[in-house]
Amino acid sequence: MAIKLTRKVFMNPCSLSYNSSRFLVRLSSDHDTRFFLSKLFGGLQESGVICRHLSFSPATSLERLSWEGSSHTVLLTKLENALKDLKLDEAWETFNDFIRLYGFPNHLLVSRFITQLSYSSSPCSLQKAYDLVMMVLKEKSYHLQPDILVKLALSLSRAQMPIPSSTILRLMLEKGMLPPMNVLQLLFLHMVKTEVGACIASNLLIQICDNYVRFCSGKSPCANLLKPDTVIFNLVLDACVRFGSSLKGQQIIELMSQNGVVADAHSIIIIAQIHEINGQRDELKKFKDHVAPLPLAFVSHYRQFYECLLSLHFKFDDIDAAAELLLDMNRSRGSHPMDDPGKDFQKPRFVPIGSQNLRNGLKIQIMPELIHKDSALKEEGKSDLVLFRDKKLLPSNRALSKLINGYKRHGKMDELSKFLLGLKKELYSSGKSSVICDVIDACISLGWVEIAHDILDDMESSGDSLDSSAYMALLTAYYKRNMSREANVLLKQVRRAGLVINLANNIVLSKNVPSNVGRSSLSIEEASSIYQPSLSKCLVEEVSDAEKAVSHIIYELNSSIYFFSKAKMMGDALNIYRRMQEMKIQPTEHTFMYMVCGYSSLEMYRDITILWFDMKRIMETGSLTPSSDLYEFLLLSFLRGGYFERVMEVIDYMNKCNMYVDKWMHKSEYLKIHKNLYRSFKASKARTEAQGKRFEHVKAFKKWAGIN
């Protein structure tokens, strides 16, 4: 009977009817026929009776459906009820069953389903919403409203799912759509909370700016809607600092200039941190003339700026510049009050990027007085070198220790004395200060008694009187070292200064009591609202760390390479790079990044491959560990130049280091430049071995990027 019925079905499957005392069904469609046969012969399929004659597609598997599930109306009703009762799991199963039988339902129901999934806090539901959007977008007859996509992107971003969130934004961007700026700020705010999210956010910002420039060149009325604002740039730049992507941060700063976005007070602080990490002292010094004259209301905000600039002076071993900055931090402050710090008091000013003499050089607009009170950024940052207290910027003990050790190495102790006198005059003119006594004590603790004595002599010559504790500390040190002749000389100075001390008692007490106990004057340590180690301890650590510090020469050479790369004078940059090799100075990540950027700007991609070989050789020795920023820029450069073997090498290195690779960005770059490369080519048509290998590398990249 079953075999006869099967033959009848195959002769005319759509006319099959099934009679029953309970119902009469006429199967008038292929879907109904398949469903009926699966139910009627379900038991026989396993034994192979029907499987030899019928072939059922996996896409039409209906194991979960009941008999009533084949009904279009019943399924729609079931789906609507599930959505009404917020039974999302049941709605998802019913929706998939409906798609298998009848395709997509009407767009209103689909939009409603996506919206309900988007409002869920469950990552599983959000992933389903994203998958559904991807399915819908493949249906060309379907159109999703932008507000639905924006809601889903925001929900994904809040749930720390930056990859699907950015994919939706990128799809919207391809259609010339973006969320309102306040919503876009929220999306970036949540996206930059993780390292992967920060990487995607920076690449997404670059893509948005590229589209903005393209729309501007085409004089499109939609251009202004695509221009990101200062807040978004600040969020991305801050994330670059937090996650150590300073090289990407430099790229974002230049992007800020190219798109005419004004840098506010928050921007300047973040830019200062990026320049410090990258060792770009000359770039940061350009901002000082705009920051120094600001009124007292801005002193606390720009403490971090001076921290970064001072750090760079020490990295470049420019002790004189460091001392000058410490004395100049509280000078030139405007006397006029500012009732509203957030108000635009003047037009933006321009700060050049790279050499000021470059004809086509970039300039970034800044407004140092502009502080957004509702900014999501917090004024945080290290306080190693500069402290804020009583409306003044003060050098920390660590900064003083770097200065003392620097002057000692350079043999310029007379300059240290001049600095100490200037520091006392600038910061503690209202009363006595223990800062000079602290320096003397620190020098004595390291055994630098001659230096301590020289400082005492310089203070006496300037007419600045010190209390007896400084003399007593030095006397004690002389007696401990059996330096009686020097002690006698110091005693004469004590008498000449009119100081009276009980020598015997004080020498005994000084062995157990620190020499700075009992001082009533304000010390640097007391001037800080946070704890900091003593000057003596900092000086000991500084002397030890100075031996391990990176040579200032590498910072100077990298600065020169950066300058020539920006000026597109790669011949000069290459000469400095070769000089580094001759001097046996190991190139750093910044060295290679500046060289790669310079060559890439001139489309000299072959030269980048030579640098890549140098990098790999140094990496094998363990002397170089590139960041994801450098790898990513190499990857883009090789992709643009068509060096696909090098592309796959870089991807392999990134995978080994567990670094995130933004496939979407590289896929878009490939389609923009090499869309038709080897489109109808076959390996058998390769004329040379090199061509065959290149075809295989292109094929491997397309497979990795998901390009059909």
Image: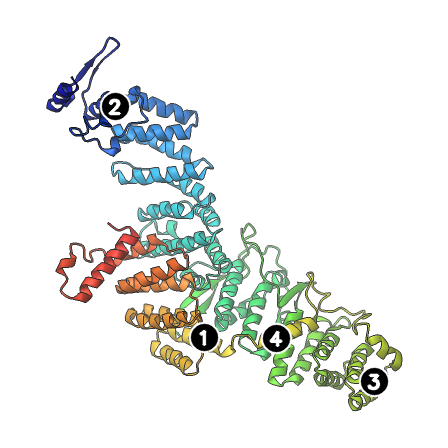
Q: Earlier in the sequence, mark 2 or mark 3?
A: 2
Q: Earlier in the sequence, mark 2 or mark 1?
A: 2
Q: Earlier in the sequence, mark 1 or mark 4?
A: 4
Q: Which residue, as the protein is rendered here, is positioned at the far front?
A: 47
> Circle 4 sits on which residue?
544
The kind of residue tagged 1 is Ser
Q: Assign the N terminus to one quadrant of the image.
A: top left
Tell me which residue sits at (35%, 33%) in the image. Answer: 111
Image mark for residue 185: none
The kind of residue tagged 2 is Gly
> Circle 2 sits on which residue?
43
Query: Percent from the top left, x then y, of residue 109?
Result: 34, 29
Residue 601 in the figure: left or right of residue 154: left
Crowd rating for badge 1 (residues with CA inside 10 Å; few <14, some 14–19, many 20+):
many
Query: Percent from the top left, x then y, of residue 611?
Result: 34, 72
Q: Earlier in the sequence, mark 1 or mark 3?
A: 3
Question: Which SS class for mark 4?
Answer: helix
Between the C-alphas of marks 2 and 1, the distance is 78 Å
Q: Which is more foreground, mark 4 or mark 3? A: 4
Q: Quadrant of residue 456?
A: bottom right
Label 2–label 3 contact, CB within 8 A:
no
Between the C-alphas of marks 2 and 3, the distance is 112 Å
Image mark for residue 494: 3
> Circle 1 sits on which residue?
559
Q: Which is more foreground, mark 2 or mark 1? A: 2
Between the C-alphas of marks 4 and 2, the distance is 82 Å
Q: Earlier in the sequence, mark 4 or mark 2?
A: 2
The kind of residue tagged 4 is Ser
